[in-house]
Image: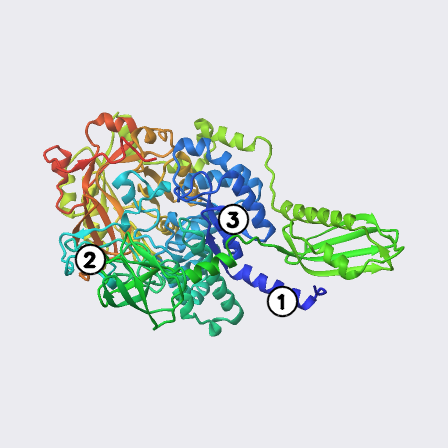
Amino acid sequence: MKDSNGKERKKRQEQMSLRENKVEILAPAGSYDILMADFAAGADAVYLGGAMFGARAYANNLSQEELLRALDYAHLHDKKIYLTVNTLMKQQELEDRLLPYLEPFYKAGLSAVIVQDFGAFEAIKEAFPGLHIHASTQMTVTGAAGAKLLKEAGASRVVTARELNLAEIKAIHDNCDIEIESFIHGALCYCYSGQCLLSSFQGGRSGNRGRCAQPCRLMYTPQTLAMPRTKGKELRGDENRQKDSNGSAYLLSPKDMCGLPVLPDIIEAGVYSLKIEGRMKNVNYAAGVTGIYRKYVDRYLEYGREGFKVEDSDINDLMDLYNRGAFTTGYYNNTKGREMISLKRPNHMGTKALKVLKNEGGRVLFEALEQIYPQDVFEIDKENSFSSGSAYAKGSRFTVNLPKKYRLEKGRVLYRMKNGELTRFVEKQYVGQTLKKKIDVHLTAACDRPLELTFTDTSTGAAVTQTGAEAQAAQKQPAKKERLAEIVTALGDTPFAAETVKVDLQGELFVPVSALKELKRNCAQALEKKILGQYYRELPKGAVEDRIAMSQDTQVYMDTKDASVAGSVENMQIQAAQQSQTRPVTVLVTTLRQAESVYPMADITDIYFDFRLFIREKDSRMMAEAVGKCKAAQKNPVLALPHILRGKDSQKGRQLMENWLAAGADTFLVRSLEQLGLLKELSRSAVIRVITDANLYTWNTRAEQFLLKTTGTQKNLRIIRTTMPLELTAQELAQTKNAVLPRELIVYTHLPLMVSEQCVKKTLGKCDGANGRMTMTGYRQQYQVQSVCDLCYSILYDDTVLDISKPETLIDKAAPDSIRYEFIEETAEPDKVLTGRQNCEKTGRGHFELGVE
């Protein structure tokens, strides 16, 4: 032990302050053991799920008891825990279950919740003061305008969409005073998070409910674009044995991201929290990846960009832990396309390790392409592998006896699926390790005076002092400083470890060992209690119950609305139609020809024009004509905005909105928070009416309250109705019938199952910038892929038409205020469909009757 050193402590505190103010490493924890290993590996915080409402329902999530224990453990070691509450919630779940579920964690000092559902956001903010709310990546935050809305709503942090580049993230940082969290390592979704319905409509497992079946990792076959055919019955070696199936490939399976090479760029763009993906991964992956990122974050913080250099060996270790056919840096550098897609394999690829030099009846001579370690595992095929019993240097040759049945021809390369040495290192360094909090220990002993022991937390300065039995004059052998120091620093069964020790021994004394040990235990308990007490919160008795009662009382809910909100609920056509006992009908068109066929139809109140009709500058005259014709036909023109609007396209989107207003129209179908934020800015000088689309999810009435509050301070911005979600049954939709805003139900459409920054045409090398469609099959179903080239994204549509327009008794169950027909295909003829003269052969009712879990 050494005496306290002021310079060393100051340096340590300065480094900690820099780390806390500059950047945070956020690791995934699918279990309590992984949480422990993550913290041992250097994570500043972990995100995890509990028993409810987590977007990884199949992870080994923590029980209430484990989570409470984890919170105490984290707080003792200056760490943070963020709880995922990032699923959409049905009305009864939000009313009855959410707040009681969170209450014990709030009281125990939970740092933050990660939230997707707008209603959950609103309920948590009201019920739990001081609890930070992080806007999940499921909210699809793509720019500064959307981030500002969330900041104003009460979010302390936004988790950006994975698709943003460095410039877009920096724009959020520069224009909105909010913490930014971004993914830096791990799996990428093909679809914008929060915009995916593919798993839901393929098999009823909704990604919005934490039950994604990962259909993007299945094989798909393009039908209308040629893909290079594979040769032979089976691909081997580097191709990893993908079977030839008429051009089939893993077209929707992105490679994993590794942000290590651009880590300084990410930090300097304004990202505070560096998020590692992987709550479904094992402990070796989570801790191993965390340890490597801890090394390089510290290197950057200490030496800056000039001293930052990534070692190939660490990239190789990350590859050994998990990769899907090499890494990319994701979208940070504005790259996308074929090089980001793992066409040949959707899961762990491993690393090239062995090359077959000769095979004589199962006696196989290998060349080591990398250093080989004992217990390395090499894959032969999907069902078979073998392990190494010894170490072999790179370039060396060795023979292994294997069954003759394996196809191990000369020249074939085998991949290492598990690195034995790396596994041993991670398990020794991190797995099963318990952190010890560093403290300074000060013992004072004087004759006929109580022993005095002080424990001081070296990181925060928090201190406790306890007194014990009196020290007495020594009759025989006096106590020695070294022995006393040894006793008071033997802290093995406590959360602490002594950093420094100081013993003031005044005279020759007898100090009872048992009394000293008891004093040590009391002091440790007192310091632990003091540290944890700083995090504990109180709630007034019955506060949660009162909140639940209020949410269940619809009349109270409506009466507490701000007066300006009531004034914003205006749609004269719908209100007039309601008075005449008819249900208004609206129509979305994708061509002007379709609009022409709808103008004469008297029962249509609104026509939604797809934005692509007017996205180019030369289209402004055509836009004005369409608005004029629509109004002449006594219908309200609505501009259906893009399914996604990234920061880089904000100016283009803003110009489109301004053109629509200049054409004499004021209503927009809004599909993202970014669009709502931009319209809020424009409403300072114009009256703007908003209809929110189905992907701005209103699964509960509280979600509507959230949306209204984001616009309530801007008098010219009025949300006039919402679109009912696509994953709820008629009965579940009916539970929100007392909502303040009118609700519109889509009764006819091709469902948008994915909105992606990627494009299958681009992946196949067939990008022509022509906004075209292609057909793709997979999982016994057919899909239409629409390339939206003007903004460079794509939409994967279900080839089957959702049609719940007949019989009307089906619609009556959901109790919508209006219904909408969407004609997504350019060849559709709305007049024939609406008058019953044309019926689609492939139709379905989606989740309208069966719903999702």
Quadrant containing the C terminus in the rendered view: top left
**Three-letter code, disc 2:** Lys
- The residue carrying mark 2 is 761
Does residue 584 appear in the picture of this structure? yes
Residue 68, quarter of the rendered image: top right
616 above or below 561?
below
Return the residue nearer the eye: 355 or 705: 355
271 above or below 823?
below
- The residue carrying mark 3 is 81
Query: Which label belongs to residue 566?
Result: none
Q: Secondary structure at mark 3?
A: strand
Closest to the camera, between mark 3 and mark 2, is: 3
Give the left or right position of residue 196, taking residue 95 as reference.
left
* Residue 656, x across and y down, in percent: 28, 54
Q: Residue furthest left?
A: 837
Return the residue nearer the eye: 831 or 313: 313
Q: Residues within 10 Å of mark 2 (few under 14, many from 20)?
A: many
- The residue carrying mark 1 is 11
* Residue 331, x across and y down, in percent: 34, 61
Return the residue nearer the eye: 486 or 112: 486
Give the left or right position of residue 752, taking residue 174 as reference.
left
Give the left or right position of residue 294, taking residue 459 as reference.
left
Q: Residues within 10 Å of mark 1 (few under 14, many from 20)?
A: few
Residue 20, quarter of the rendered image: bottom right
CB of mark 1 within 8 Å of CB of mark 3?
no
- Residue that appears at 21% across and 45% down: 779
Closest to the camera, between mark 1 and mark 2, is: 1
Q: Secondary structure at mark 2?
A: helix
**Three-letter code, disc 3:** Ile
544 above or below 752?
above
Q: Earlier in the sequence, mark 3 or mark 2?
A: 3
